[in-house]
Amino acid sequence: MGAKPGDHLNTNEPIAQVETDKVPMTRLRKRVAIRLKDSQNTFAMLTTFNEVDMTNLMKLHSDYTDAFVEKHGVKLGLILSFVKAAISGLHNQPIINAIIDGDDIIYRDYIDISIVVGTPEVCY
């Protein structure tokens, strides 16, 4: 049963049991992690922009916007497409969703994406 507008969720309670794998880092991976962190702390960070052909996505969006508004009473946004792409990437490359904990790498078997939704009254 999903949340409805106006529902306030208790974020302190786990929604589901999550699984992780904790794997010790090799000496080489530890050294690379240290060097990368040192580089991040020492040098200016640059932002890279990649251009993407969104022609097909924009066509899909325009084809379904009117029906979506009619059925749900709200406009169809593009954020769901970006979230779907992020989820696909995380499934295909699970290392992206891993974290470093001391000398271990923790691979998560779950994806947790949060999105802020604004309304005229409040953000959810």
Image (cartoon, rainbow, N blue to C red):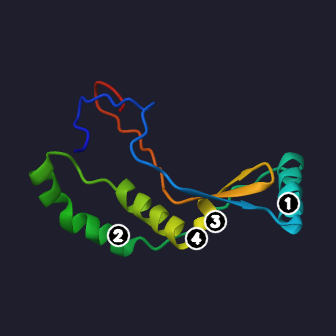
Q: Which residue is mark 2?
A: 57
Q: Residues within 10 Å of mark 2 (few under 14, many from 20)?
A: few
Q: Given the image, on which type of amino acid does mark 2 rest?
A: Leu
- Secondary structure category for the residue under label 4: loop
Q: Earlier in the sequence, mark 1 or mark 4?
A: 1
Q: Nearer the viewer, residue 42 or 50?
A: 42
Q: Which residue is mark 1?
A: 30
Q: Given the image, on which type of amino acid does mark 1 rest?
A: Lys
- For the C terminus, the image quarter is top left
Residue 123's place in the image compared with 36, above or below, is above
Mark 2 or 3, closer to the camera: 3
Which residue is found at the position 37% from the left and 62% from the top? 81
Q: Earlier in the sequence, mark 4 or mark 2?
A: 2
Q: Earlier in the sequence, mark 2 or mark 1?
A: 1
Mark 2 or 1, closer to the camera: 1
Give the percent coordinates (x, y) of residue 23: 71, 62
Q: Earlier in the sequence, mark 2 or mark 3?
A: 2
The furthest residue to the left: 70
Q: Which residue is mark 4?
A: 93
Q: What's the distance in space between the residues labelled 3 and 4, CA to CA?
A: 5 Å
Q: Residues within 10 Å of mark 4 (few under 14, many from 20)?
A: few
- For the N terminus, the image quarter is top left
Give the percent coordinates (x, y) of residue 9: 34, 31
Mark 4 or 2, closer to the camera: 4
Q: Residues within 10 Å of mark 3 (few under 14, many from 20)?
A: few
Q: Which residue is mark 3?
A: 95
Q: Given the image, on which type of amino acid does mark 4 rest?
A: Gln
Which residue is found at the position 86% from the left and 63% from the top? 32
Q: Nearer the viewer, residue 114 or 78?
A: 114
Q: Residues within 10 Å of mark 1 (few under 14, many from 20)?
A: some
Which residue is found at the position 55% from the left and 69% from the top? 51
Q: Is residue 13 left or right of residue 19?
A: left
